[in-house]
Image (cartoon, rainbow, N blue to C red):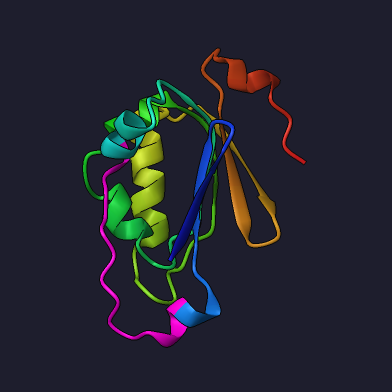
Amino acid sequence: MGQGKEKNAIYAYASAADKADAGVEVQGVTMDELMRIHQFQKIDVLKIDIEGAEKELFEHDCSWLSDVQAIGIEFHDQRIKGCTTAFFKAMSNHFHGMFTLSQWGETFIVKRLDGSACERLTLL
């Protein structure tokens, strides 16, 4: 598993060699830990593509969502049932039902509409 950091952004990727290794153990971190480690107070745009782990992420403490302005997410309910439901339940609780939803390819775009700076954000 490779990882990188570019000017206030973090990302991870898997190479072909990583995919060939079955049973590779990867350290996990919570969103709160990730924000603390990288000293993020707020997240303007968060892209989530975690291949079926959406359900696990959004069924636990999602207080960090209060610090997120927009999310791009791919759902993988075909792998783990309930991913989409868990996400929208968390959105309802932490975005207070005030968000827009659009789709770009496989990615769903959710923008906060509660008077925050995100209302001025345009996603292509």
Name the quadrant of the N terminus. Answer: bottom left
Image spot of residue 27 (x, y percent): 25, 58
**How many numbered marks appear?**
0
* Corner quadrant of residue 96: top left
Is 33 situated left or right of 66 in this image?
A: left
- Residue visible at 32% across and 58% down in the picture: 55
Residue 77 picture quarter: bottom left
**Viewer-closest of 81 and 107:** 107
Q: Quadrant of the C terminus?
A: top right
Q: Residue sitting at 41 percent across and 26 percent down?
A: 40
Q: Where is residue 111 shown, x and y percent of the image?
A: 58, 33
Residue 48 lies in the magenta-colored region: no
Q: Which residues are magenta?
A: 18-31
Residue 79, placed above or below residue 122:
below
In-image side of 19 versus 9 (left or right): left
Considering every residue shown, the one lying at the far right of the view is 124
Q: Nearer the viewer, residue 77 or 46?
A: 46
Q: What residue appears at the point 35 percent right and 70 percent down from the top-left corner?
A: 81
Asked if 123 appears above or below 42 in the picture, the reply is: below
Side of 34 where 47 appears, left or right: right
Instruction: Tell me what residue is drawn at x 35 percent, y 62 percent.
Output: 53
> Which secondary structure dominates the residues rendered in magenta?
loop
Which quadrant of the view contains residue 101? Answer: top right
Q: Looking at this view, is 79 or 8 the one in front?
A: 8
Q: Residue furthest left?
A: 60
